Every structure is written in structure tokens, then in C-alpha cells.
Image (cartoon, rainbow, N blue to C red):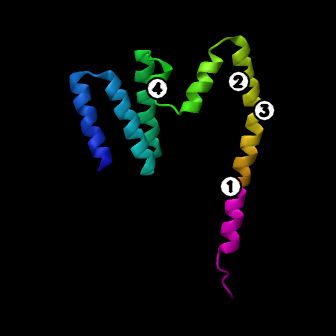
Amino acid sequence: MAIENYQQSLMIFQEIGNRHEIARTLNSLSQAYYQCGRVKEGFATAYQATQILQELELPIDSMPYPQWFKSTIKFAQRGKLHLALCFIAGLIAFPFALLTFTTLILWRIIRAFVKRPRQHL
């Protein structure tokens, strides 16, 4: 039902030509697609929203990103040293994030295997 409402809103904003609201509606629509498991449609819709927002050249604060991401972008835009610090932090953080993700996946697989009822032959 939410997807239908977003699609109706999208048609209205397209008729009146409000590109900022088109992008916001596309972003909301993409989230609804993701929540319904329609990942490909969600990705395509989010990509359209991002393209429109980039064309509008809006300030970073009006972008639909989490606050921590906006703060990181602003920090990296201060100069070459700040950009280098963000790059180094990313290089340091990436292995830990990968290790955490891999551990989580393995834990879920092992837990599902252990909890699975055994069938006796």
C-alpha cells in the first residue's frame, strides 16, 4: 500500500515538475521496496533519486544520508589532510568491519546448524 502511495505522489510531483520532491519520493519508495524484499527495484529507485539530487547540486545537509555520513563528508571536504585522514581511517576500519561481518555470518550458520532438529534413521 505504501508503494502505491509513493508512486501516486511521484506522479503528482512529476506533473508539477518539483525535482527535489521527486528525489525525496524516490528515496522513500526505494526504502519501501527494500522492506518488501524487492532489492533490485529499490536499488534502481535509490539510484534515480541520487542522480536527481546530484543534478540539483543541493547542499550535503539536504541529502538523505545518515548524520554520521554527512559529518564524515564535511570533514573530508575541509582539505587534503582531512581527506587523507578519512582514507587512512577507512583502511584501518575495513578489515575490522569485514571480520565482524564474517563472524556474524558464520555464527548464524553454526547456530542454525546446531538448532536444526536431528533426524534419526
Residue 29: x and y, percent?
Answer: 37, 39
The region drawn magenta spans: 106-121
Residue drawn 56% across the image and 26% down it: 70
Kindly report the secondary structure that dominates the magenta region of the rendered protein. helix
Q: Position of residue 19 (x, y in %)?
A: 32, 22
User: Mark 1: which amino acid?
Assistant: Ile
Q: Earlier in the sequence, mark 3 or mark 4?
A: 4
Name the residue nearer the viewer: 64 or 49. Answer: 64
Residue where numbered disc 4 is placed:
63
Up the image or down, 10 lies above or below 19; here it is below
Q: Residues within 10 Å of mark 4 (few under 14, many from 20)?
A: some
Count residues near mark 1 (Cα–Cα under 10 Å), then give few for <14, some for 14-19, many for 20+.
few
> In the rendered view, does 96 fall on the left or right side of 8?
right
Give the image quarter of residue 4: top left
Q: Nearer the viewer, mark 1 or mark 3?
A: 3
Sequence-wise, the earlier of marks 1 and 3 is 3
> Which percent across, then down, holds residue 113?
69, 69
Q: Is residue 51 one of those drawn in magenta?
A: no
* Residue under numbered circle 3: 92
In the displayed structure, would residue 77 be above or below residue 111?
A: above
Q: Which residue is mark 2?
A: 86
**Label 3: how many residues lie within 10 Å, few (<14), some (14-19) or many (20+)?**
few
The residue shown at (70%, 72%) is: 114
Q: CA distance from mark 2 to mark 1?
A: 27 Å
Mark 1 — residue? 105
Q: Depth check: 60 or 114 in front? A: 60
Q: Amino acid at mark 2?
A: Cys
Q: Secondary structure at mark 4?
A: loop
Residues tagged 3 and 4 counted as in contact (Cβ below 8 A):
no
Mark 3 residue type: Ile
